[in-house]
Image (cartoon, rainbow, N blue to C red):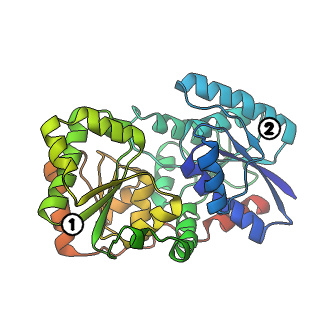
Amino acid sequence: MIKILTIIGARPQIIKAAAISRAVATKFQDKIKEIIVHTGQHYDANMSDVFFEELKIPKPDYNLNIGSGKHGDQTGKMIFGIEEILEKECPNYIVIYGDTNSTLAGAIAASKIHIPVVHIEAGLRSFNKRMPEEINRIVSDHVSTYLFPPTQTGVINLVKEGFSIENNPPYSIDNPGIFNLGDVMFDNSLFFSEIADETSNILSDMNLEINNYILATIHRNNNTDDKNRLTQIFKSLHHISKHQNVKIILPLHPRTLKQKDSLLQKEFLEDLNSNKNLIIIEPVSFLEMIALEKNAKLIITDSGGVQKEAFFFQKPCIILRQETEWVEIVESGAAHLCDADFDKIIESYKWFDENGEIQATNLYGDGNAAEKILQHLLND
C-alpha cells in the first residue's frame, strides 16, 4: 500500500481533491492511504464543515490554521507546518493542486526533503508573471516528479519550458513524467451535477427559468479593487439585464459588495440598485453553483474554474480578463476574452445571444481522470 499526502488550502482545491479522495475510496481503498492536510489558507470552521459534509469529502487529518497574510509570511508558515507533517507521515507522494500559496508551500517543503511531488493541473500558464498564481504554477511544476496537465495545451507549455514527454520511469525530480489524463474538475462536474439535480432547489426558490437567465461572478482583485474596471463591468451587466430584459444572477462576496458600494458613482449606483433584473445574492454553495451554471443561458465571469464549468455544461462564456489559462476554450469559440471592456462585453453577449448554445468538444478527458492518475502512481 502506498501513502499519499494531499495539500488543500482554498475552496477550489477542496473540490479538486474530492475527485482523488472519491477514487481512493471507491477504487483503491486496499492500495492507497490518503492523508489530507488543510493549510487553513482560506478557512472558516462553520462554512468549511458544511462544505465538506455537502460534498461528502473526507475531513482533513491536519489543519495548520495559517490564515491570511502577506505572501512571504503565509507561505513560510505553511512550509514549516507541512515539513513537520511530512517528516511524521513519511508519504510516498505529496499531491498538490493548482496555483495557490498552499500549492507552492507543499511543493517546496516536499522537494527539499526529497518526497516526490505530484502536481495536478500542471502546465497552466497565463504568461503574466505579475499574477502570484503564475509564479506558484511555474515553481511547483519545476520541482515536481509527476505532472498531470488537464489539457494538451498544458503539455505544450511544459515542453516549451524544457520538459520532455519522452522520459521513462523511474521518474524523479530530474526525470519527471508528464501525462495528460484529463481534468479532475470534469470528473467532479459530472458527479456533482447529478447530486445537484437531486438536492438543489435554488432555481425554484429564485423563480428562474431554465436557459432564461445569465449567471455572473466577479472576484479577482484587479476587477474588484479598480474603480474603472469595476464600473465598466457593472455598467455592462446593468445594460444587458435592463435593455435585453434578461435576469442576471450575481452571487457576490461581502468584500466585493462593499467595493461596489464604495467605488461606483452615486448616481449610477442608485440606478443599478433599482434594476430588478440584476439580482445580487450572497455566495452560494458548490452544488447550488453547479445548478445555476448548468441551467443558465450564458455565463459572465473572471473565475478560471467557472470558465471551465461553463464549457463542461456547454454554456457560452464571457471572460472578464485579458488572458486565460484555458486558452482552448477561447480557441474553440465557446468563450470570448472581453476584459473589463463595456463594448466588448456587450458585443459578445449579442453574438452569443444570436448564435445560441455552443457545442463543447472533448478537451478535458472522459470523466475518469482521478482514477487514471492514481493508477499511474501505483504502476510507477
Residue drawn at x 46%, y 49% is 157
| Type of amino acid under label 2 | Leu
Q: Is residue 286 above or below residue 260?
A: below
The quarter in which the N terminus is drawn is bottom right
Q: Quadrant of residue 268?
A: top left
Left or right relative to 196: residue 206? left
**Numbered label attached to residue 99:** none
Q: Is residue 246 above or below residue 118?
A: below
Q: Quadrant of residue 361?
A: bottom left
The quarter in which the C terminus is drawn is bottom right
Q: Which residue is denoted by mark 1 in the rendering?
A: 246
| Type of amino acid under label 1 | Val
Residue toward you, 155 or 255 = 255
Mark 1 closeness class: few <14, some 14–19, many ≥20 residues within 10 Å? some
Q: Earlier in the sequence, mark 2 or mark 1?
A: 2
Q: Quadrant of residue 359?
A: bottom left
Q: Give the image location of residue 44, x and y in percent.
A: 60, 42
Residue toward you, 98 or 37 = 37
Query: Disc 2, disc 1: CB below 8 Å?
Result: no
Mark 2 closeness class: few <14, some 14–19, many ≥20 residues within 10 Å? some
Left or right relative to 292: residue 265? left
Q: Give the image location of residue 219, x and y in percent.
A: 38, 44
Residue drawn at x 61%, y 55% is 51
Mark 1, secondary structure of its residue: loop
Q: Nearer the viewer, mark 2 or mark 1?
A: 1
Mark 2, secondary structure of its residue: helix
Q: Give the image location of residue 218, x and y in percent.
A: 35, 47
**Numbered label attached to residue 86:** 2
Residue drawn at x 53%, y 69% is 365
How many marks on residues? 2
Alpha carbon distance from label 2 to label 1:
52 Å
